[in-house]
């Protein structure tokens, strides 16, 4: 009688699409504090699409809870890159969150947040903004890094539930798609104008250590307008020029010189910061865990 054989153990299948690779371009870029300066440009490009702008206008809490919304959005983005197995879970959570977001845009057209073209555009904006912002705040990408960035951004799109058929598969296919959206879709929506206004009643920051929150609350009447001016300046300045032109945003030669001076300071200071200050907390934790061979999920759960 032949000896019994033991079936080979099956490896557990991943719970969903995997995030970009450890050590990739996004691994270095997305958690760097300089990404905080680039993200408002991507957000503004997103809401310049009438359908997306209408959805944010009607369903977002960006007016009443801007700091909380920003914190939640930033954590979500960090999970896509550094979350390990939790990345796919976060992607599913976001799609569930957007299922009920629908309505009519300013042109009377019906929209739904999960319409593939709209959902894909929200994601697509990150690639050109990272690519453009890095030229100022770090260094221009090499051709190989540029292609790697786009490939990794496609992987993030799969985490968000975006089908390959809804995003250009290569850089060569991306730019005609991008230019078509700029030419045919984008405009200065109500939300764009609000995000760039310097006289909005934005509440004082309510995140961070208590002493800092109390100090900011006391000083906010003096700090609010300068903060809004700086935010608008960086939003427009770090937006790719063709997107800026498509939306109808002004940018002068004097502003460009100021941005370049600021960028020189950022390029000099950020690289010499300790890693715990250079990278956002979730990214710093994931990078440290990767060096010690611990999965991001295990590190976050304390295992």
Image: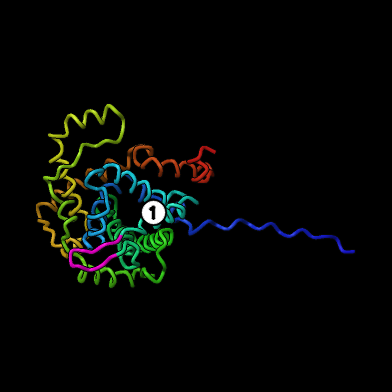
Residue 107 inside the magenta-drawn segment: yes
Residue 219 inside the magenta-drawn segment: no
Crowd band around label 1 with a 10 angstrom C-alpha radius: few (<14), some (14–19), many (20+): many
What is the x, y in percent for residue 185?
21, 68
Give the image quarter of residue 43: bottom left
Q: How is the image coloured?
A: rainbow
What span is colored magenta in the figure? 102-111
Point 31% across, 30% down: residue: 209
Point 27% across, 57% down: residue: 129
Residue sticking out furthest to the top: 211
- The quadrant of the rendering that contains the N terminus is bottom right
Give the image quarter of residue 14: bottom right
Per the image, the residue denoted by label 1 is 26
Q: Is residue 6 left or right of residue 150?
A: right
Give the image quarter of residue 47: bottom left
- Residue 297 in sight in this render: yes
| Element class at badge 1 | helix
In the depicted structure, whether residue 197 falls above or below residue 273: below
In the depicted structure, whether residue 269 falls above or below residue 153: above
């Amino acid at each position: 009688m032949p000896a019994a054989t033991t079936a080979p153990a099956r490896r557990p299948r991943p719970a969903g699409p995997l995030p970009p690779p450890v050590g990739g371009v996004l691994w270095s870029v997305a958690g760097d504090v300089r990404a905080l300066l680039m993200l408002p440009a991507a957000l503004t490009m997103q809401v310049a699409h009438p359908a997306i702008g209408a959805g944010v206008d009607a369903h977002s809490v960006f007016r009443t809870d801007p700091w909380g919304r920003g914190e939640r959005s930033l954590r979500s983005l960090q999970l896509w890159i550094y979350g390990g197995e939790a990345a796919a879970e976060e992607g599913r959570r976001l799609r569930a969150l957007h299922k009920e977001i629908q309505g009519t845009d300013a042109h009377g057209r019906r929209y739904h947040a999960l319409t593939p073209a709209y959902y894909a555009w929200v994601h697509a904006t990150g690639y050109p903004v990272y690519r453009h912002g890095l030229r100022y705040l770090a260094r221009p990408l090499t051709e190989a890094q540029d292609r790697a960035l786009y490939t990794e951004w496609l992987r993030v799109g799969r985490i968000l539930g975006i089908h390959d058929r809804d995003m250009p598969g290569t850089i060569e296919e991306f730019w005609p798609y991008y230019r078509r959206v700029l030419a045919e879709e984008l405009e200065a929506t109500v939300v764009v104008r609000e995000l760039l206004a310097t006289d909005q009643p934005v509440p004082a920051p309510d995140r961070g250590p208590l002493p800092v929150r109390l100090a900011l609350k006391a000083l906010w009447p003096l700090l609010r307008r300068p903060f809004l001016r700086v935010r608008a300046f960086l939003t427009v300045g770090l937006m790719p020029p063709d997107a800026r032109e498509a939306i109808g945003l002004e940018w002068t030669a004097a502003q460009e010189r100021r941005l370049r001076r600021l960028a020189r300071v950022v390029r000099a200071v950020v690289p010499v910061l300790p890693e715990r200050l250079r990278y956002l907390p979730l990214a710093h934790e994931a990078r440290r865990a990767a060096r010690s061979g611990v999965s991001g999920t295990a590190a976050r759960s304390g295992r």
